[in-house]
Image (tube, rainbow, N blue to C red):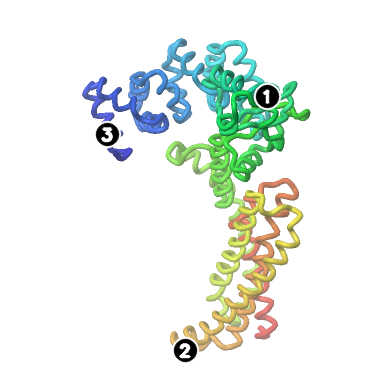
């Protein structure tokens, strides 16, 4: 059944007060799908639908619900209902919830948690927002090197239900991380086997201070379900699971796309962002790019007498600027993506520049040759424009070659330079690079025209 149809069925049952049928349908649904249904509901329907859910399903679905609906639900909850939900949430989900809520809601959440949980929450909140420490959860299974497999299974049965994952267990000695053992390792070993004999001592871990994007890319690189987080003395303090890493990658990719499109990043969905807020996110870069584009106008004005002497040159300015901007955009997007995935490092700058120089020469050469033939065949002969002479075509095509070459060079080097000085490479994307390339293209155009056409 499609999601829209399912929503209509549920809301129809709800309005007809067929609550037993409604509860039976929703009880069989995945928590994430339940969250989508609740998010699509209006006003008080959100609260009523949530209260119709079985307790275990309600608490699981709550973690998937949008922060605005979560706030609405918490406001409507009794203290008992709030405690039931918070007690069932994993600690990292509780921290995420607190970070999204206003102060009065946060105070109410903390008031309805026990002292140990409050202490753990405060520890996680103390880490920088973009660090591994803020992303991790302390709810993991740890074993000792001298434990047997049978003893390990007994511990997993006892504590596993309240842990984020049991598929990977971490072996510690005096809290220091010394090994890792998977559930597969335990299942395929005899009960008498000691953990120290089957654990993997080559443990991939991250530090609490590492950027959360580094954590996510490390998880993806090594195909891990979870990764341990250690402090400066290699003591394990938590783990980051793959579902949280996927959320980070999605957030970072969205942020990069927005920056590359000259938009101030936002963490809200499109339809959750008001018109005025959207305006505020877009207008700063538009103003900056508009002002910076003044330079291209100044260049055209400075060569106004040259254009007057050969008006035909004006017709090819848009094509040259667009081609240069597109060429620079191709390089910048490729390099920004490589930097974000870790495929390109700062030390690779010379290799990147050398490669883009060769690409620029080939692309610029092919475009120039094709355009030369196009101008003489189509513009001059077919369209009958006698002003398009071989000299004019040569000026345009030489400029195109220079524009593509320079655009590739700028497009590859600026993102790396931005990262070297501590800026986000995504800022140096198409709009910014296009403005620079436009100015350089115009200067090259008029200088070449002046040299070849003596205008």
Report if residue 379 is visible in the image. Answer: yes
Residue 366 placement (x, y as % from top left): 59, 77
Q: Is residue 260 above or below residue 38?
A: below
- The numbered mark, 2 or 3, whose residue comes first in the sequence reads 3
Q: In whole angstroms, how far apart are the C-alphas of marks 2 and 3?
A: 63 Å
- Give the number of the mark in front: 2 or 1: 1
Q: Position of residue 62 (x, y in %)?
A: 45, 25
Please identify the quadrant where the C terminus is shown: bottom right
Q: Earlier in the sequence, mark 2 or mark 1?
A: 1
Q: Is residue 397 above or below residue 412?
A: below
| Of the pair 183 and 279, the residue shown nearer to us | 183
Taking depth in this image into account, of 416 and 44 the one nearest to the observer is 416
Q: Which residue is at 24% across, 29% downward?
A: 12
Q: Is residue 206 left or right of residue 312?
A: right
Residue at image position (21%, 24%) is 16
Q: Are marks 1 and 3 in contact (CB under 8 Å)?
A: no
Q: CA distance from mark 1 to mark 3?
A: 44 Å
Which residue is most to the right? 233
Image side of residue 70 versus residue 342, left or right: left
Q: Which is more toward the observer, 164 or 263?
A: 164
| Disc number lying in front (2 or 3) | 3
Residue at disc 1, secondary structure: loop
Crowd around label 2: few <14 · some 14–19 · many ≥20 (10 Å): few
Q: Which residue is mark 1?
A: 126
Q: What number is the disc on residue 381?
A: 2
User: Looking at the rendering, which quadrant does residue 452 occupy?
Assistant: bottom right
Q: Earlier in the sequence, mark 1 or mark 3?
A: 3
User: What's the distance in space between the residues labelled 2 and 1, CA to CA?
Assistant: 72 Å
In the rendered structure, find residue 254 and report the number of the disc placed on it. Answer: none
Residue named by callout 3: 8
């Amino acid at each position: 059944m499609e999601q829209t149809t399912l929503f209509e069925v549920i809301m129809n049952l709800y309005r007809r007060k067929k609550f037993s049928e409604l509860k039976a349908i929703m009880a069989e649904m995945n928590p994430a799908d339940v969250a989508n249904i609740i998010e699509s509901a209006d006003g008080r329907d959100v609260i009523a639908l949530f209260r119709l859910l079985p307790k275990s399903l309600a608490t699981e679905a709550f973690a998937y619900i949008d922060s605005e609906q979560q706030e609405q639900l918490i406001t409507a909850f009794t203290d008992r209902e709030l405690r039931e939900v918070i007690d069932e949430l994993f600690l990292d989900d509780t921290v995420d919830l607190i970070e999204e809520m206003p102060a009065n809601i946060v105070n109410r959440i903390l008031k309805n948690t026990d002292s140990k949980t409050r202490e753990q929450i405060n520890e996680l909140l103390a880490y920088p927002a973009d660090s591994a420490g803020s992303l991790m959860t302390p709810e993991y299974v740890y074993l000792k090197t001298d434990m047997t497999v049978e003893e390990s299974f007994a511990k997993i049965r006892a504590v596993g239900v309240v842990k984020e994952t049991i598929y990977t267990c971490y072996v510690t000695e005096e809290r220091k991380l010394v090994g890792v053992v998977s559930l597969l390792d335990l299942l395929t070993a005899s009960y008498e086997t000691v953990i120290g004999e089957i654990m993997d001592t080559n443990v991939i871990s991250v530090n609490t201070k590492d950027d959360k994007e580094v954590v996510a890319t490390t998880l993806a690189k090594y195909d891990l379900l979870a990764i341990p987080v250690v402090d400066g003395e290699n003591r394990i303090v938590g783990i980051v699971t793959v579902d949280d890493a996927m959320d980070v990658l999605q957030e970072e990719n969205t942020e990069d796309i927005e920056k590359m499109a000259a938009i101030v990043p936002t963490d809200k969905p499109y339809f959750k962002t008001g018109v005025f807020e959207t305006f505020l996110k877009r207008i700063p870069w538009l103003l900056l790019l508009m002002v910076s584009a003044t330079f291209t106008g100044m260049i055209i004005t400075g060569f106004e007498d040259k254009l007057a002497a050969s008006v035909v040159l004006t017709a090819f300015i848009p094509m040259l600027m667009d081609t240069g901007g597109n060429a620079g955009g191709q390089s910048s997007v490729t390099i920004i993506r490589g930097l974000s995935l870790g495929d390109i490092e700062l030390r690779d700058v010379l290799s990147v520049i050398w490669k883009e120089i060769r690409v620029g020469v080939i692309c610029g050469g092919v475009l120039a040759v094709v355009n030369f033939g196009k101008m003489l065949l189509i513009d001059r002969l077919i369209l009958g424009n006698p002003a398009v002479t071989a000299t004019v075509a040569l000026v345009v095509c030489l400029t195109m070659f220079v524009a593509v070459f320079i655009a590739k060079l700028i497009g590859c080097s600026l993102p790396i330079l931005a990262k070297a000085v501590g800026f986000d490479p995504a800022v140096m994307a198409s709009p910014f690079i296009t403005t620079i390339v436009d100015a350089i293209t115009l200067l090259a155009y008029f200088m070449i025209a002046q040299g070849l056409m003596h205008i």
